[in-house]
Image: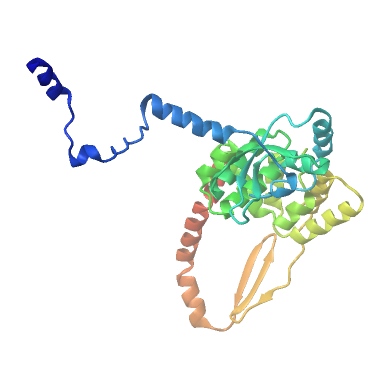
Amino acid sequence: MARKNLLEGLTAVKSTPETETEPSALPRRTSGAIGAVGRSFAQMRENAVVEVPADMIDAAGLSDRLGDDPDQAALTRSIEEYGQQVPVLLRHSPNVEGRYEIVYGRRRVVALRALRRPVRAMVRDLPDRSLIVAQGQENTARKNLSFVELANFARQMRDMGFERKVIQDALHLHEAVVSKMLTVADRVPPELIAAIGDAPRTGRDRWVAFSKALAGHEDAALAAVEAAREADADSDARFEAALATTRSPAPRKAAQRTEWGSVRQTTRGTTISLDRDQAFADWLVARMDDLHRAWQGQAGTDGESNQSKEE
């Protein structure tokens, strides 16, 4: 009996304030087998494919196409016949509750909207930066985007504040190629690029040469492109029309008057004439070297110096 009582004493749990209360929940494990299972479920939720009404999906990100997509009709026919084979990626709209925005798969959404069919999609929460980078990576995977369309996309990314390295990674392009793209996009006015269009058969070298020769011919080039458009010329023909205007001397511009003198710019150079203010003339001449060095430093930061080395 004594032994029995002794065993009971060893196995009994004494009633204390701590044991009478509910035991505290153990901390959730985030490593090991349990953590791996939790991560797997989270990944499964991210990769789950759902159906979203096409009219609940809005465009987002940057404009990548210059003009209509010539392959859109063929894609729509293919989806109509075989269905949507690959889901698109959407994010929840940060502005409108219950709506979605396209991360990638724009062409499929356009086709399904035309067919009045729901869109099979994965939905994730992504910030604007991730959306733009994903869109750039999608552009790289599409073989039919032209040089100038990629250049225009790179310029938009830069203007939004993306670093050069992010642009390179998004487009899977080397620094030298991105530098040339941005140089072309900066030298050729956006309205002229839009008027010319995607020019699918016009490559990098011709765009670079055109951008170098364009200075002073912008108005003539735009007029030539508009005339070509009225004649139903395709995008590459419009580029050729713009290029042709650079082969003749640039029109002389009338001298622009200022409160301190006048400026005349021609293809041979720029002439600055100062009024009879000797004090200002002396001040300007004394600082000309400093101004030139400041300009060189600014040019070096925007890729111009890299451009000269590559060429």
275 lies left or right of 233: left
Residue 179, visible in the rendered structure: no
Residue 310 percent location from the top left of the image: 56, 41
Q: Nearer the viewer, residue 174 or 159?
A: 159
Q: Residue furthest left?
A: 2
Q: Residue furthest right?
A: 231
Q: Quadrant of the C terminus?
A: top right
Identified at 78% across, 48% down, the residue is 67
Residue 95 percent location from the top left of the image: 60, 56
Colour logic: rainbow
Identified at 60% across, 45% down, the residue is 91
Identified at 82% across, 43% down, the residue is 114
142 lies left or right of 162: right
Which of the 4 image quarters holds residue 189? bottom right
Q: Quadrant of the N terminus?
A: top left
Residue 35 percent location from the top left of the image: 40, 29
Residue 143 percent location from the top left of the image: 71, 33
Q: Nearer the viewer, residue 155 or 81?
A: 81
How many numbered circles are shown? 0
Which of the 4 image quarters holds residue 118? top right
Q: Nearer the viewer, residue 237 or 78?
A: 78
Q: Relative to residue 28, is residue 186 depicted above or below? A: below
Q: Relative to residue 271, is residue 204 depicted above or below? A: above
Q: Residue furthest front?
A: 1
Residue 109, visible in the rendered structure: yes
Which of the 4 image quarters holds residue 78? top right
200 lies left or right of 158: right
Identified at 26% across, 41% down, the residue is 21
